[in-house]
Every structure is written in C-alpha cells, then in structure tokens.
Amino acid sequence: MDIFSALQTAVSGLKAQSYAISNISGNIANSQTTGFKRIDTSFEDLIAEQSRTREVAGTVLAQSQLTNTLQGNITATNVATNMALRGDGFFVVQQRTGDANSQATFTGQNLYTRRGDFTLDKSGYLVNGAGSYLQGQNIDPATGQVGATGPIQITDTTLAAKKSSIITYGANLPATPKTTASASSTSALYAPADTSALVTATDGSSTTGKMVTAANAGDFINSSIAGPTLTLYTDNGAPVTLTTRWAKIQDATAATPAVWNMFYASDTTVANDKTNWINAGTGVTFDSAGQLLQPSGGNLPLTNLTVNGTNLGTVKLAFDKTTLTQYASTAGAATTNALSQDGFSAGTLSDIAVSETGQILGTFSNGSVKALANVGIARFANPDGLKVESGGNFAQTADSGDPLAGLGGSTVVGSNVEQSNTDIANEFSKMIVTQQAYSANTRVMSTAQQMMSDLLNVIR
C-alpha cells in the first residue's frame, strides 16, 4: 500500500466511524421509544487483490446490524389495550390512507412492529403511538364466529340475551345418602306410596306426568338430598331459578345397578315442601363401583322445563363418567364440582383485556366474558433480515423470509409495553471507542500528508 492508498483507507475509516456514530446517535435518541430496536454497526474489511506475500490492510465498510431478536424490558402501563410480546414475533399493522364512504381505508400492505402501545381511536380501531393500525380477526361475541383478517375494530358492543340450553354439571352422589328419613329408618332410598313419580328407564321414554305433587312434597324433601341450584335465562334474558334435588330409588346389586332420579321445583316462590317436584324423566344409574352407566351419552334432558310458569323448552344437563360419580361420602350429601350454564341476559361492553394467547376479551355488564378479536402476530425465520421503516415498523424482505402466522412459543402480555432495547451505558462506551477510532483515522491522514510533503521536499 502506498501513501495515496493510506489516505483512501483513512477516508473510508472516517466514513465508517461517521456511520457508526450516526447509529449510536439514533439509538440514544430512541432510548425511550416504545418497541424500538437499536441498530448496531458491523465493520467489514475490503482487501485489494494481492499475492499472499503482499497482503496489506485495505479499506473498511460499515453496515447496519439489526437487533430485532433482542428483547426490551416489559413494563406495566395499566392501559388495557396496550400489549407486549414476550419472545419472538411482531404485531401485524397497516397504515391508514384516509376515509371512503365514512369508512376508514388502509394501504393493504402489512408491516410488522414491536410497538404495542395500542389504544382505541374514535372509530374503535386499535392504533399505536406511531399511527399504525393493528390487524387481526374480529370475532362476533354472540356467536363466536371469526371474521376475515383485517383491522381490529372494537365498538360499544351490546351482547344480546341468550337462552340457556346446556347445564355443565359435575358432582359426586353419595353411595348412601343421609336424609331426614334415613335418620329414623334403615333405608336411604326414596320409596313413596305413589311410585308413579319414579323412573327406572334410562332412555328418557317415561317423561309424562312423572312428578311429586305438593301434597307429598314434605315426604319427598325428607327422603332426598339437595342438587344444584342455579339461574337459567329465557330467550329475552329473563332469569329463572332452577332448584333441583336427587332421590336414590334403587341400590346396586349383582344383577341391578343403583338408580337415581333428579327432580326440579316447579315453583320457587314457595317453600320446597309446598311445590310440585317434576321428575327429569330419565333414570341415572351407577354400577357397584360408583361408575356412571346411564345415560351413556352423558346428557340428562330436562324436557319442557317450566319453572314459575316460564317455559324454557329443553335444557340438557351435561356430564360424563368422569364428572358424575357415586362414591362413598361421610357427609351423605351431593358434592358439586362443576356447575355452569350457557345462557345470559343482555349486556353492554364494560371492560377489555388481552390474554396471553393474543385474544382480546370483553367483559360485559351481565358478567359474560367473550372473545372480541384475535390479534395478528407474525414471526420470521430471520427477523434481522427485515427492512427498517419509520414509526417502529419493519417490512418483509427476501432475506427475512415469509411471515409465519401465530405466536409459536411466545406470549402476549396485556396492559404492558416493550421498551427500547437500547442500553445507554453501552452506547456511551461505543461512542468513546468510535470517537477514538475517528480521531486515529484523522491522524493517519495528517501523517500521510506529512509524508507526502517530505517526499516533495526531497525533490526540491
């Protein structure tokens, strides 16, 4: 390398260190920018073609090195629609272009960001602090139907009332129930004088007229145990209280199973011993080990369910062999392990939260929690191959590969945001080193200039 090459190399060094200091400056400037990923600088040496014995240091090229895979600190904001990603991935966003026919329009080109400080705009769209609109799938809270992919929009949703149709039930019925009657007799079975109220069939075929009348309700109460009590809802959302009792009518033997009947009160406005008790119409049977035999399908239909004069149609009591059992119990009472139903009254949206799986959940005034949207998440095989855009956004490139939908092993943290991954102390350290390298290159230039001057003086 001659003196002129040394000058060229020093100039390339000045350019490279200038490039590095600009990246450092940008990192420090964005140390408080939500979701910002710092840009480091890598240096590459360029060697002119020489023989092995004549190799010399050549010029230098500075290139940006992205840090998209490095997690920033996650901090709480207490804003329900804010969200951060713990792990790999990016939020899918688009830019808004304007309005057409009173509807927002978007570019249609997906961008990707870690900036999750999303809030609702006046139209209910989720937009972050840089003006990027979150993409995903809106969900109908009433039906659970998932819509097409597009901008997520959450409005003042009203949840229509839903009629109760299924009761999910889990319990253990005691092998020997303790009733008021059993305390003074040797039998825990319900054996009324009018046996027409009882059902041994397990196929639901004996449903008509099976009930304990109010006149015999006292004996029934004394010979049965309390079952689940819960509120059901009609088509228009009116609440109806369902009160049930279990009566054991047959013990298990080598040849026959244990049989239970479920009854419900037809009038809950009066005392339990003053109302008719309607038989569900299907026997529930267990083997001697306490395992459920019938109904094998796990559904006990309450056909033409009518309480306090309100008809709810058919409501199914859903259970299976693992949730409904008949094991020994010292208490002698039914132990309820699970009890829920699928109906609700009308309600309005009162609160929003983001789950770890990336679902936006709405809490309604009737207590229902329903999914409102799925947040669009994308991952890349080479995240550092993305192209940096303004506003904390990245664009797909050939180097990054195609986006992979979903979280993978990552999680979404609601009411939080990811901070910049810039380390101020580290940036100042790099600044000192860069400044020294820049000064050293200027020294090379001045030295080379002096050597040229000395050469010219020799000629003179």
Image (spheres, rainbow, N blue to C red):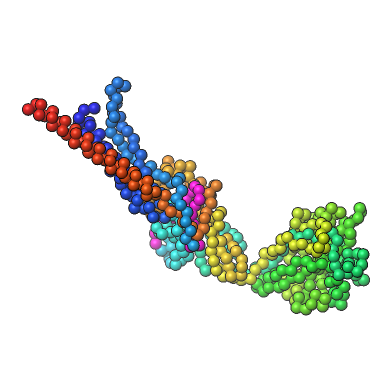
Q: Residue 321: where, in percent of width, then height? A: 77, 54
In-image side of 315 versus 94 (left or right): right
In-image side of 109 versus 348 (left or right): left
Residue 260 picture quarter:
bottom right
Residue displayed at 43% across by 66% down:
101
Residue 80 vertical position relative to residue 409 in the rendered view, above or below:
below
Residue 4 vertical position relative to residue 211 in the rendered view, above or below:
above
Residue displayed at 82% across by 60% down:
330
In-image side of 196 versus 165 (left or right): right
Q: Main secondary structure of the magenta part?
A: strand
The residues colored magenta run 79-98
In-image side of 250 versus 41 (left or right): right
Q: Quick one: which residue is furthest to the left in this view? A: 460
Of residues 94 and 33, the one drawn nearer to the viewer in this rendering: 33
Residue displayed at 86% across by 54% down:
288
Residue displayed at 67% across by 67% down:
343
Query: Can residue 216 be seen?
Result: yes
Q: Residue 63: where, in percent of width, then height? A: 34, 40
The quadrant of the picture occupied by the C terminus is: top left
The quadrant of the picture occupied by the N terminus is: top left
Is residue 84 inside the magenta stretch?
yes
Is residue 258 inside the magenta stretch?
no
Of residues 234 and 389, the one drawn nearer to the viewer in this rendering: 389
Query: Can residue 109 be seen?
Result: no
Q: Residue 166: where, in percent of width, then height? A: 71, 63
Q: Residue 437: where, in percent of width, then height? A: 28, 39
Total marks drawn? 0
Residue 243 picture quarter:
bottom right
